[in-house]
Amino acid sequence: MGKDSLKFLDLGGSKEMMSIWEEYYSASHALLYVIDSSNTETLDSSLSIFEALMGINDLDGIPVAILCNKNDLVSALPLEAIKEKINKLTHLFENRDLLVFSTSALTG
C-alpha cells in the first residue's frame, strides 16, 4: 500500500458534540452523515441539521454520503421515503456529489 491514508472521525450528534464540529470543517474532504432511519421522530430535525451543514463555507463542494442506518429494524423507514425528504433539499447539492445508502451496523 502507498502512503495515502484515510482518517474518519465520529463526531456524534449530541448538542455537546455538535459544538465542536466546526473545528473539523476546514480539514474535511468528504462528509458521511448518518441518519437513524428507525426514528421517525428525529428524522426531520436531523435533516434540518444536515441542511445547515450544507450551508457552511468550509464544507462547500465536498462530496457527501448519507447513511440511513438501522434498516434492519421493523420501524425503519424505507430508503425511498427518506430519499423523498432529501430530494426536497436538492438546491444544496448543485456543486457536490451526493450518495444515499441504506445501512445496518449489524448486517452491513
Image (cartoon, rainbow, N blue to C red):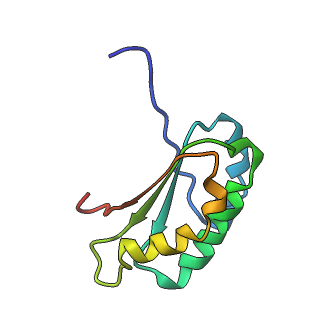
Closest to the observer, 14 or 51: 51
- Give the answer, above or below, for where 1 lies relative to 57: above
Q: Quadrant of the C terminus?
A: bottom left
Closest to the observer, 42 or 98: 98
* Quarter residue 75 falls in: bottom left
| Residue 62 in the figure: left or right of residue 81 | right
Q: Residue at x 67, y 55 (%)?
A: 54
- Give the answer, above or below, for where 58 lies relative to 99: above
* Quarter residue 13 falls in: bottom right
* Farthest-out residue, right: 57
| Residue 55 in the figure: left or right of residue 75 | right
* Quarter residue 67 falls in: bottom left
Q: Residue at x 49, y 34 (%)?
A: 7
| Residue 60 in the figure: left or right of residue 44 | right
Q: Quadrant of the N terminus?
A: top left
Where is residue 3 shown, x and y percent of the image? 43, 15
Where is residue 50 shown, x and y percent of the image? 62, 62
* Farthest-out residue, top: 2
- Give the answer, above or below, for where 56 lies relative to 45: above
Q: How many marks?
A: 0
Q: Residue at x 74, y 51 (%)?
A: 56
* Farthest-out residue, left: 107
Q: Residue at x 44, y 25 (%)?
A: 5
Where is residue 39 shown, x and y percent of the image? 46, 80
Where is residue 79 shown, x and y percent of the image? 37, 71
